[in-house]
Amino acid sequence: MNEILTAEHLNKYFHEPEDFQVLKDVSLSVKKGEFVSLIGKSGSGKSTLLYLLSTLDTDYEGSITINGTKVTGQTQNELAKFRNENLGFVFQFHYLLPEFTVLQNVMMPARKLGKYSVREIEARALEKLKLMDMDAFAGRGPLRHPVIPACAGRGGLALRGPRVPLHHPAPPASDGPPPPVGEELR
């Protein structure tokens, strides 16, 4: 299997309110097809490591390579382009844009990428919504529409899923389950 992520000797410091080393000489590699979970106490650096690995935080020592591309040292513009083309994110909150329909929200990242026609993106988005049994919500919106609160719980979670894979990036990074999931799984 090919390595899709390699991190070598990562060190991360916070300087407010005082100097504190949150990550010390962290190295890891992830092979294509592997599923990785970071487990630790609150405050142990899990989210900090995820932010580094996802290129959202660039203030660190060490080296990160993703899909054969060394991302350490790239400019913010280069990293933004890299993230859009290569990484997927599932945030703890859905961050849906209220002025757009559910379908438009799902299509947004792939449209920004600009590699596929709007028709192809829409077809992929509808396919992902159907896969998650959310296709009935596709035309709903803007999201302040009274029916859209149904998208806040299960739907909000479901809408995070389809937004990630439309353009087939690497497996998504997730900073823990979103709040509604814990309640639904009990």
Image (cartoon, rainbow, N blue to C red):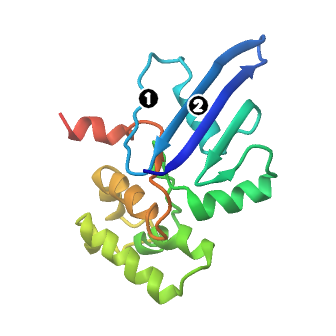
- Relative placement, left or right, of 173 versus 145 is right
Residue 69, percent across and down? 67, 54
**Element carrying mark 2:** helix
Amino acid at circle 1 = Leu
At horizontal 70% and vertical 15% (from top left) the residue drawn is 21
Q: Residues within 10 Å of mark 2 (few under 14, many from 20)?
A: many
- Which part of the image, by quadrant, shows the C terminus? top left
Residue 4, percent across and down? 52, 50
Decide which of 48, 30 is in the foreground and name it. Answer: 30
Residue 140, percent across and down? 37, 73
Q: Are marks 2 and 1 in contact (CB under 8 Å)?
A: yes
Q: Is residue 67 above or below residue 49?
A: below
Decide which of 145, 22 is in the foreground and name it. Answer: 22
Residue at image mark 1? 38
Residue at image mark 2? 49
**Element carrying mark 1:** loop
